[in-house]
Structure formats: C-alpha cells, structure tokens
Image: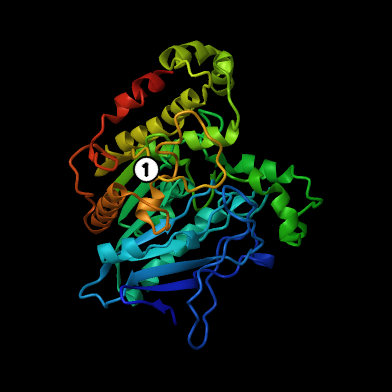
Amino acid sequence: MSGTVTSTYRTFGNIPFAAAPVGENRWRDPLPARAWQGVRDATKPSPRCAQSAGLGEPVSDTEDCLYLNVTTPAKNPRKPRPVMVWIHGGGFTSGSAASYAAQSLATKNDAVVVTVNYRLGVFGFFGYPGLPGSGAFGIADQQAALKWVQRNARAFGGDARNVTVFGESAGGLSVCAQLASPGSAGLFAKAIIQSGACGVTGAQPGQTFWRRRADVEKLGAAQPLGCQDVACLRGLPVSKLLEVHAVFANPAYDTRVLPIDPVAAQKTGRMHRVPTMVGSTHDEATLFVGLIFPAVVPETTYRAQIAGFFGEANADEIVARYPVNGNGDVRDELGTVLTDSSFGCASHDTRQQLGRHQRVSGYEFADVDVPMIFPDMPPIPGGYKAYHASELPLLFDFGVPLTPGQRELSDYMVTAWGRFARTGDPGWKADVQSLAAGQVRPADFAKDHKCDFWGQL
C-alpha cells in the first residue's frame, strides 16, 4: 500500500474495509472486502457516502463508500501505539471520514488514528418488512470497520488491544450503539462520546434518536418509491433514493447488530464496561436555533414556542425558569432551553448511569469565541458561543484560524484525548472539566444546565 509520507506523519486513504454495498449488497450487512493484487494507491482520501447537501456538505451519489483512512506518526514505533477510531457526525444523513484530518492527534500522541465511513440516511438506516438488518446497516458498517482495525492495527504500528472508539454528534450516538451492541465485545477498550449522549433528543424534546425496527420497516414501506418489493428497490438509482434520504435518520434497535435500545441498555448496565469519556459543548443548541429560526423570534411568541416544543402542560414552568432577557428576540433563550433539555442533561444522565459500572470522565467545551465552521449561518443574539461541534477544530486539523489561547487549549485537549486513549484517564480530577481558552477548570455542570429541573419534568 502506497500512502502519503511527510517528515512527521504518514496517511493512507481510501482503504476498503467491506465489500461495495451496491446491487444485491444494497441494504445488506457488510461483507468482506475483496483482496487486491500489487501495491494499492492509498494517496487519496475515502469518498463521501451518498448523501444530500447539508450544513456545508455537498451532495454525493457514491454508494460504494465503505472505506477508511489511517494516519500515523512518520517514525516506526518502539512499541505498539494506541489506536483511535473516529466515527463522524452529521445527523446520520451526512458527513465523511475524509473531513477529519488527524495529523495532530496522531503525532502529538504517538497514536494511530483511523477515520471511518458508514452508510448514511436511506442507504444506512432504511427499513422494509422482511428485510434482515432493517434500519441498522450503518451501525453494522461501523462494527465492520472496528473488526478491520482488530485485524490490521499491527500493520500500521497500532495495538489492537488498546483501541478507543470516539465520535461526535451522530458519531457520539454511534459510540453509544457500539457500547450496547453484543457484536462489539472486544473490539475496543475505551470510548469517547462527544455531543451525542445516548439519550440526546432531536427536534422533538423527549424523543430520542433510536427507533424500533418494526416502526422503521413501516416507514420504509410507506415511501412513494414505486416499488412493491426489495428487489425493485435495489434496482432504483441513487438519485431516486436521495429523494427520501432525510426520512431515514434514526438507527433501529430490535436488530441483530443492536438488539436493545441504547437508552435502556445504559439505564440497566447492559453495555460494554470500558473506561468512557462523555462530554458536550456549553451552547450546543445555538447552531440548531440558527438553522430553524434564521430571523428574529419576538418575545411575544416565546411561550407559544416553548409550548410547541414541550407541550402546554410544561410551558409556564419552563418560561418561569428561563425568563426573557428583554432584547426583543428569544432565540438566545431558546438556545439555552434546548441545550439544557436536549443535550446537557442527556450527557449528565449518561455519565451518572454509566458511572455505576465503569470509570467515566466528563468534559464541557465552553470556549465562546471559537470560529464558526459552518457556512452562511445567520446572526443570532449573543452569538453562537460554544455551539454544537465547536470543539472539532481544536481536535482535528480543520485549518481554521485560532487565537494563541485557543491553540494552547487545542494542545491541552489533543493531549487529554491522547492520554485517555493510552490510559483511560484524560488527566483531570473533576467529574466534568470545563474547557475554554485560559479557563480550564472544574464545571458545576448539573447546576449550570438545571438538570434537577429537567429530571422532574
């Protein structure tokens, strides 16, 4: 295999970890990749899995996408290196492994970093009556990539016995799925969940991302695709399936790869008991508020907005706990409410429940001046602050401008993630460490995000 070599790191891209999921393999659990003859060109990154355009991600029609990328330090190791396997986010409908350049994580931590693709949207989470694996093909892909790492880590200088799986947003939820999946036993020794705690909710607070397989199958049968069986559906062009791509954004349980709802698995201790780090950003939901409400939301509509999200019965109590600040626009209040209810307290719950059975560390990314990495976001009152995914340019080589303080924070975080991958300990004693430029300190997380209040609603 021929990759890209510099004085400090090596990268190998576009490595197949499973057979092409096309034709008869569309909507089947991943099969072994074909062996190749000679020297494989690994100088190009993995392709982008088929997806619609969204949040800076262009459209892709590439169904043959089960590839991964490997980054290592340039020098041969004196002893096997820890391996970090990254699962990207994107709401289970978008994103790509190749978007995450991992030179800093690899070189500063003397680690092997693997970034993986998995089938998205209608290709990864479609269900249909009688279709084996319905709704969980993308989760099965991730597990196939972890198995590839077990077989091949040594060839890249990695230690297959010391693998950390980590991911953000849908990638964090995917880590939850792998923690709950019996088939993942022995495939990783540590886990990091970033802004994707098992009980995170989406547009409808209280509704988690997981769906029962039977419900996903009914949803698939109801789509206006002009087919009456799976054979016909497998013959449809990618462009036709992309018309319903966003409908299938929820992994299914009651499946082979995911027998149990990860939220139930978390509550009952039916998860792999490995050291786990669980974190979020301080202002997760500002990003989504900006997307949902690009224009001013008047204060006179605040209670109605809250009632629309949480129901009439809870509206007055929530409004009283989160009063308006008088700036005439309640998008900042909505951002705080949705951060606490959908993300913050879900992270707290995951730390509390997993912590009954295994070592758990926590963090909160709280740098309010981090650059915006998503294009064309409208202005909102107070700014986006530590928005959803805002920690990523400090962990990966995104090439965005950072202040000297943020570069120092980036070094601290990269080192902490690497230390966790080596030892299961990020290096802080606090239950939750707040991470901001010049202000790394313990956080009073549950109080800040009013988790007692949300727990009793």
Q: Is residue 307 left or right of residue 116?
A: right
Residue 16's place in the image compared with 383, above or below, is: below
Quarter of image, res 197: top left
- Residue at the spot 38% in from the left edge and 71% down from the top edge: 151
Residue type indicated by callout 1:
Arg
Q: Is residue 149 left or right of residue 90?
A: left
Residue 341's place in the image compared with 121, above or below, is: above
Quarter of image, res 64: bottom right
Place of residue 91 in the rendered image (x, y in percent of width and height, measured from the top left)? 54, 45
Place of residue 68 in the rendered image (x, y in percent of width and height, measured from the top left)? 47, 67
Numbered disc total: 1
- Residue at the spot 38% in from the left edge and 62% down from the top edge: 102
Q: Quadrant of the C terminus?
A: top left
Place of residue 97 in the rendered image (x, y in percent of width and height, measured from the top left)? 48, 60
- Residue at the spot 37% in from the left edge and 37% down from the top edge: 368
Quarter of image, res 65: bottom right
- Residue at the spot 43% in from the left edge and 57% down from the top edge: 398
Render colour scheme = rainbow
Residue 320's place in the image compared with 58, above or below, is: above
Q: Quadrant of the N terminus?
A: bottom left
155 and 7: which is toward the camera: 7
Place of residue 233 in the rendered image (x, y in percent of width and height, measured from the top left)? 74, 56
Taking the view exactly as shown, the residue that stands out farthest to the bottom is: 38
Label 1 crowd bin: few (<14), some (14–19), many (20+), radius 10 Å = some
Q: Which element type, helix, strand or loop, lies under badge 1?
A: loop
Q: Which residue is mark 1?
A: 270
443 and 78: which is toward the camera: 443
